[in-house]
Image (cartoon, helix red, strand yellow):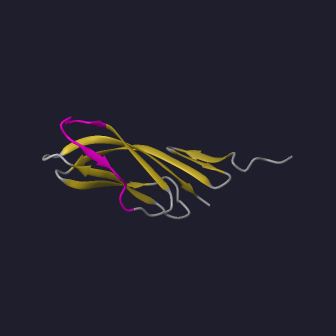
Amino acid sequence: MKINPALLYESGDNYIKYGDGTAIVWGTTTISFKNNAATYNTINLPITFKNTNYVVQETIKQLFNYHSSITPHPGTRTTTTCQIGGWNDWSSTVTGYIDYIIIGKWK
């Protein structure tokens, strides 16, 4: 009997690992974006990725100042951490939530 290697290998809080080496991590972080600047939170990833060639997708979930314009983009990444954040085009500090999903290889 042949077992599909893409079947679930391991899962936990905010991550899933597949037998073929694919890993998916997700979460939400709260950020206070500084005015006219890039601001990041460093996320400790719940797993170790094989390398830093993973894909990071960010989505602004909610901003508490609707007059602002935030451009989400990830910052520096390692195999165990990733900076989640973006650029605030507004002239004052803006607080909000960012949802993120990270897809890469764990083996």
Q: Main secondary structure of the magenta part?
A: loop
Q: Quadrant of the C terminus?
A: bottom right
Report the number of numbered marks: 0
**Residue 106: within the magenta?**
no
Locate residue 92 relative to residue 73 in the image: left or right: left
How far across and down, in percent of the image, does residue 71 sit? 29, 48
Name the residue at 30% across, 51% down: 86
Residue lying furthest left: 91
Name the one closer to the observer, 24 or 36.
36
**Residue 68: within the magenta?**
yes
**107, above or below 46, in the image:** below
Locate residue 105 relative to residue 95 in the image: left or right: right
Name the residue at 51% across, 44% down: 13
**16, above or below 80, in the image:** above
Locate residue 29 relative to residue 4 in the image: left or right: left
Name the one closer to the observer, 82 or 44.
82
Residue lying furthest right: 1
Name the residue at 47% across, 45% down: 26
How far across and down, in percent of the image, does residue 77 sit? 41, 62
- Which region is colored magenta? 62-76
How far across and down, in percent of the image, does residue 85 sit? 32, 51
